[in-house]
């Protein structure tokens, strides 16, 4: 009950204080969905690739999104955007495969953020290790000259961590990585660190997790949301 009250209070404050229309609409959508089964919500699986893991000095290079509608992944509506950065991708290209030349016609940061927030208006965000993605969005929004913001998301890493801690007192190193989590549900292993592929991998993982937790019709959004 406290979590529900707190989320309602938080979202109402965010709606009141938000200066971005798309984010205001996003918060309003979350508020209407809190107590409804997750099967009825429209979700948006998200992955962001970066030049490093420090939101204060590293930059986003790509964003991948894929919606989940009526508890089904919708690959035909998947999108992938590259983002212009200052300087070079450097050694991070070895991880995500995005080269400097690939970013020549990429979206400026501000346009990429506007695009993403438009996609989020009537959807619930889902990510694996959502805290990192949301920290980068916060820093990027600040760099673009806009105000800071707060977002809520379903984090498949947190879901898996809670499930695993019920079985084991200590978690093995690397056991919460995306592919390691997928392997426990007999999901295929994809090549990691492409934003769109990882967004799809996250979406599939969430559906597998929820099916083992009692099904999407029996779990409400308020049970799953975490804040950054």
Image: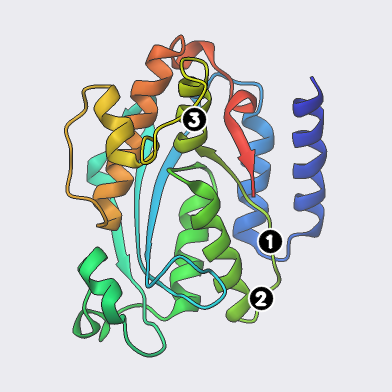
| Residue 120 drawn at (x, y percent) | 51, 51
User: Which residue matches tag 1?
Assistant: 149
Q: As displayed, is residue 149 above or below residue 180?
A: below
- Which quadrant holds the N terminus? top right
Q: Is residue 73 visible?
A: no
Callouts 2 and 1 close, C-beta under 8 Å? yes
Does residue 24 appear left or right of residue 45 in this picture? Answer: right
Q: As displayed, is residue 161 above or below residue 17?
A: above
Q: Residue at x 28, y 22 (%)?
A: 185
| Residue 165 drawn at (x, y percent) | 51, 22
| Residue 127 drawn at (x, y percent) | 44, 44
Mark 2 or mark 3, which is nearer to you?
3
User: Which residue matches tag 2?
Assistant: 146
Q: Residue at x 43, y 12 (%)?
A: 215
Disc 1 secondary structure class: loop
Q: Nearer the viewer, residue 4 or 128?
A: 128
Separation of disc 2 and disc 1 at Cα? Answer: 9 Å
**What is the image's colouring?**
rainbow
Separation of disc 2 and disc 3 at Cα? Answer: 34 Å
**Which residue sits furthest bottom?**
87
- How many marks can you see? 3
Q: Is residue 26 visible?
A: yes
Name which of mark 2 and mark 3 comes first in the sequence. 2
Q: Residue at x 50, y 47 (%)?
A: 130
Callouts 1 and 3 close, C-beta under 8 Å? no
User: Which residue matches tag 3?
Assistant: 161
User: Could you classify mark 1 by the number of other residues whose Cα lies within 10 Å: few (under 14), some (14-19), or many (20 or more)?
Assistant: some
């Amino acid at each position: 009950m406290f979590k529900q009250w707190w989320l309602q209070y938080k979202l109402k404050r965010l709606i009141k204080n938000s200066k971005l229309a798309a984010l205001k609409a996003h918060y309003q959508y979350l508020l209407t969905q809190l107590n409804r089964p997750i099967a009825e919500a429209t979700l948006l699986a998200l992955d962001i690739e970066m030049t490093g893991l420090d939101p204060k000095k590293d930059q986003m290079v790509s964003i991948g999104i894929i919606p989940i509608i009526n508890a089904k992944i919708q690959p035909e509506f998947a999108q992938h955007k590259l983002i212009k950065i200052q300087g070079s991708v450097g050694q991070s290209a070895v991880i995500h495969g995005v080269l400097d030349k690939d970013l020549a016609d990429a979206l400026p940061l501000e346009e990429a953020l506007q695009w993403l927030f438009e996609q989020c208006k009537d959807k619930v965000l889902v990510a694996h290790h959502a805290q990192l993605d949301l920290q980068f969005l916060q820093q990027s929004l600040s760099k673009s000259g806009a105000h800071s913001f707060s977002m809520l998301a379903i984090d498949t890493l947190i879901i898996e961590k809670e499930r695993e801690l019920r079985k084991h007192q200590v978690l093995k190193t690397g056991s919460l990585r995306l592919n390691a989590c997928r392997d426990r549900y007999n999901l295929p292993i994809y090549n990691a660190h492409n934003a769109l592929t990882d967004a799809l991998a996250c979406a599939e993982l969430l559906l597998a997790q929820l099916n083992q937790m009692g099904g999407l019709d029996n779990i409400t959004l308020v049970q799953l949301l975490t804040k950054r």
